[in-house]
Amino acid sequence: MAATDNIRASTETLFSGTAQRRSANMGQILRWLILFIGGVAMVMPIAYMISTSLKWPHEIYDVNLIPKEPTIENYTFVLEDGRFYMWFLNSMIIATITTLSNVLFDSLVGYTLCKFRFPGRYIVFIAILSTLMIPTEMLVIPWYLMSQQFGWLDTTWGIMFPGLMTAFGTFLMKQFFETVPDDFIEAARIDGLNELQIWWTVAMPLVKPALAALAIFVFLGNWTAFIWPLIVTNSVEMYTLPVGLSTFGDEADVQWELIMTGAAISTIPTLIVFLIFQRFIIRGVVMAGLKG
Amino acid sequence: MYRNLTIRQKQIVWAWAFLAIPVLFYVVIRFYPTGNAMLISLQNWNLLGDRTWAGLDNYAKLMQDEVFWKVFKNTFVYLLIGTPVSLVISFIIAYHLDRVRFMHGFIRMLYFLPFMTSAVAMAWVWRGFYQPVPVGLFNNYLAAAGIPQIEFLRSTTNALPSILAPAVWAGLGFQIIIFMAGLRAIPRSYYEAARIDGVPWWTVLFEITIPLLKPTIVFIVVFSSIGFLRIFDHVFNMTSNDPGGPLNSTKPLVLMIYDTAFNAFDMGYASAQTVVLFLILLIVSLIQLRILRDR
């Protein structure tokens, strides 16, 4: 016994290098394989959505991922009456304007709070920060009453006014303006630029990555926003894509190929944008997540 | 006049000029509505009739409302299952994905893709998956494997986890990305030292990696908890024939607020519910920050 043990021990020391490396390699391959399968499983719901949207009604009961006779019939049918174009346009307008507004105002406020010394600075900062704690759901009733009073119900302005500025964005931008050296701003002042020019031409270009991160978050947030647009709109023409899709789903009832098509229409554009700007978007998400 | 000001005074003028519109926005669109919600919660108002003072009646009514306690429980079930499950899964994936070089970017993209989808669209897609045979994907697979059908959305016990699944699924990508950034921030030298000392991997994991990830974990826990406590889009769209059903078994607080305010038009009662939601969010965030920061 002892002898065999000794032999085994000595062979193990002899070969342990390669054996370990081989088992490490096997482990590495296994790790990769499991992660890969998991990743494929993650995108399966999206793949099935697209697959079902390309199937004829009689084929949707089939679990095949690849349609036997692919068709774009569902898309023609869903897009026919033009509602999806309308909702798409509404969502696009709202998400674009709120994004621009946030990029502009959040950075202006963030910059002011970061680079100016003035009475009231601390109070303004704390006040804006404290709104982070207030959930949107608490404000929807007062916003609704306000919109009713001012005739903002069922208008584009009504849908987007609550999101024109965010405390999250302001805080994010303030953090990033900390990285802009004060000397740059001083130098620009000596060169005779006014404060607005300094902000726009000196400071803003230096925080471009942060602006991009902010823009991604705000756009995605408004593109997918549901509860407030659901409350404030009541005519089909004013619906945003999520609200429209929600009503469309109820209306299509059990015609799942049509529901999947509607879902695909509202998902594919953001997925394409993501695939194009992938690295950039992931970096932005990390930045916003860690600093915000 | 402006010319006669000192540099410091000019700065003050500029600062307030920059802040004028935003301050107005925050006062009118954030602070006034917050106060208004609290005020309305103390009134009886059905949107048409008069607003009458109710004191704490709405809150008293809430405490005696059986539906509220059901909803309260549901909301915390979403939180107490959703947060730990998504935290553990996303950590495990991030931990391993961080050690993979081959096609790293591609695999990361697969996991992140669901985060870019809209909750409403995916709620409908998953609702389709949960349908009984012959439509539903999951039940079709079960049938093919000879396993009895599962009532996903029509059962009072299965419906809530079924709704939670796509919510967890959609959020994983974000958490994985944040975890990986956290893992990257841990200095390599710590691992080198552990390797030279021959420390086993689980000791490295529990003594180095997880303690150093604490800020990341705090962020993810607080962020995802707030998300699960405010769940609405998934529930509303997956149960739109009977929102929050069956038998209120999936109804979260936000859906109850929506119903009370915009179906029953009981603005006072709904506002009281929103104040309760606000308090829950506040307390849960504070507790989590306390526990996770101190340890």
Image (cartoon, rainbow, N blue to C red):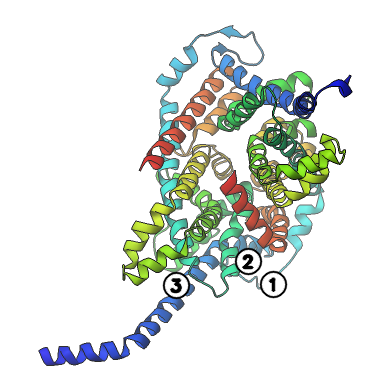
State whether residue B292 is above or below residue A255: above
Q: Which residue is mark 3?
A: A31
> Where is residue A127 shown, x and y percent of the image?
62, 26
**Helix, strand or loop at disc 1?**
loop
State whether residue A24 is above or below residue A130: below
Do the numbered discs 1 and 2 sit on residues whose CB atoms are within 8 Å? yes
Query: In the figure, residue A100 lies in which quadrant?
Result: top right
Do the numbered discs 1 and 3 sit on residues whose CB atoms are within 8 Å? no
For the residues beneath circles 1 and 3, the answer to whether they share a chain is yes
Do the numbered discs 2 and 3 sit on residues whose CB atoms are within 8 Å? no
Marks 2 and 3, the one that precedes in the sequence: 3
Marks 1 and 3, the one that precedes in the sequence: 3
Tell me how far mark 1 sits from mark 2, CA to CA.
9 Å
The residue under label 1 is which amino acid type?
Glu
Query: In the figure, residue A276 lies in which quadrant?
Result: bottom right
> Where is residue A13 shown, x and y percent of the image?
27, 87
Query: In the figure, residue A196 lies in which quadrant?
Result: top right
